Structures are given as structure tokens and as C-alpha cells.
Amino acid sequence: MPRLEHLLDVHSFFSFGAGASSPSRLVEQAKLMGYRHLALTDVGGVYGAVELHQAARRHGIAVSTGATAIVETELGRYPVPLIAENRAGYARICELMTIQHGGVEIPGRRGGSGANSSNGGDPRSPTGTGGGSRDADGGFVTIPMLEAHAEGVHALSGGRDGFLTRLLTARRYREARQLLETFKGIFPQRFWLQLYAARHPGDRKRAAYLRRLARDAHLPAVAAPEVRYATPELMPLYDALVCGRLGITVDTRTRSARRTTCRRSPTPSSASSGASARSRCCCPTCSRTPRCSPSAPPSSCCPTG
């Protein structure tokens, strides 16, 4: 069975209520577990980029900088992890995050005004706004804004809170396929269908369906478990942070369907088998095929300062 060598959807404590470990601790744990590459995709910003690269130099692991955009579509708002392929991609992600936080559109870019609000947000999304004023994670971006900032950027379809999982769970298969084609058009040869760890009832069946969907849509599928904290003992802290973001108590969270225990750094073997027994480890930023070599992405993927 192949071992996963890349973690492509990692949140640090710079993701408000959606991460419990520092970038340094996540890099250290990834190195200890045998991973060769980590991509930090915090919600709404690249705040951990400097610490991420400093830790990468100390521990000898390749890293990429990214961010998770909250994208508004006709079907709702969904998190879309973005990873910079080069410096141009890093700049586009930074511009997009500025827009997401309510900044003005960058001159010379298509995509309309950057003014937005969080009214109508879904409480299940990483921002957890649930309507009302914009919170610390910022607002959202539209499809045209995303398209205007796609150069040099790779995108994942998202994990458990992503549009595919949520639409498929609601049995909205046609809408899921249509939105998948939209993102495929925005990121030609740079859009990846995300397979996350199968630790909940129905996850393996869902992973099999996602693999078939990727094959039918001519898209590469990548094993990308959602990592939100480094080690198991941080689960209670992460659980409390999630509850605070959602505005519920820990007891309420305990009685509901819990997902926090599945978001620690997995072992390379368990991540590969959990997401898909057939998936190969790959890194979007170092190859354009789903069976790329495990070589590290180029240093130009992220700024060094």
C-alpha cells in the first residue's frame, strides 16, 4: 500500500476556531511522521507563512503556502483550499484574501467590487458566521473574483465541509457535477478532487463515489486528509474552539455527530488507506499529474522572507 507523503489541507491556530496548533508544531509533527511536504491552507489568510517557512528550514521539510477561500456560489458558500504554485500564485492568493476580508478589488483585475458581507453564511462552513456581521475570518469571494485570481494557483474541491460532500449528502448530484465543472474551468489542469480520511460511517462509500466522479470528470483525485491539530491530546482544545466558533457548548457538541477526533495529523499509511486505497500520494505544486514523483515543490512556491 502506498504511503502518503504530502499533507495538502492543514490549518493552524491562525484559522479562527478551526485549528489548534502552531505552524511550527504542525511542521515538526509532519516531519516526525515521515511526511515530505506540507501545505498550510488557513481560512482567510496567509498569516502563518513566515513561521511555516522558518520551521520548514529547521526541520528539513518542503512546504507550500496557501489559504482557504470562502466562495459564494448560486448553491451556497463553500470552503475551497488554494495552494500557490509560484510567487505569482502567492500574490493572487494574498489579493483574494484581501478581497474576502472586505477590501477593494485590486486595480487591473477582473471580478468586480470586493465589497461583501457575511449575511446568509452557513454555520457549518469554516467561517461559522451563520448570518449577521462579518467575523474574524472575513467574508467571502464570488466565482468571478476567484476566476480573476486563479493564475499560478491550485485548488482542491474541499473536504467534509466542501461543496461536493455537502451537495452529495443532500443528493443534489446534478448541481454537484455542474459546480465541479465550473471550478474545473477556473483552474484548468490545476483543480484536484480531494479525498479525506474515511473515519465516519459512509466515508468509504463516499470516497468510492468521489473516485468515480473524478474519473468521469477527467480530474485527478488526491488523498488530502483535513489536519486541524498536530497530536491527539489537542483534541479537547480543538473541540472547544469549534464549539466557540459555532456558538454551542461542548456538551452539545458531544451529543451531536462529532468530527473533531478525525482532524489530527494522521500517519502516512492510515491517511493513504483511509482516503482511498487506490489513491497515490501527490503534490499539486510539483506536478500536473495525479501520479507525480514525491519530489519537493520548487522553492518559488512561497516567499522566503
Image (spheres, rainbow, N blue to C red):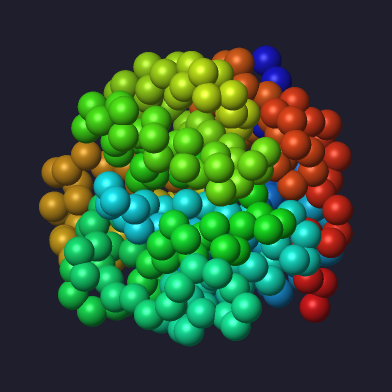
Q: Depth check: 186 or 284 in front?
A: 186
Height in image: 146 above or below 212?
below
Q: Is residue 214 visible?
A: no
Residue at 50% from the left image edge and 44% from the top image edge:
183
Residue at image location 41% in from the left, 62% down from the top? 142
Q: In which quarter of the view is residue 27 placed?
A: bottom right
Q: Decide if residue 87 is on the left or right side of residue 43.
A: right
Identify the image quadrant of residue 172.
top left
Residue lying at 71% horizontally and 57% vertically, measured from the top left: 152
User: Where, quadrant-wise, is the N terminus in this rendering?
Assistant: top right
Q: Position of residue 225 (x, y in %)?
A: 52, 39
Say above or below: 197 vs 86: above
Percent of width and height locating residue 21: 52, 62
Q: Is residue 282 left or right of residue 161?
A: right
* 284 with respect to 264 (left or right): right
Is residue 268 found left or right of 41 in the rendered image?
right
The residue located at (55%, 19%) in the rendering is 215
- For the question of whether residue 279 can be seen, the reply is yes
Residue closer to the observer: 223 or 112: 112
Image quadrant for the C terminus? bottom right
Q: Is residue 292 or residue 117 the one in the foreground?
A: 117
Q: Tell me where residue 73 appears, x and y as whole percent.
A: 34, 53
Q: Where residue 184 appears, x then y in whole percent?
A: 55, 39
Of 158 and 204, the residue lying toward us: 158
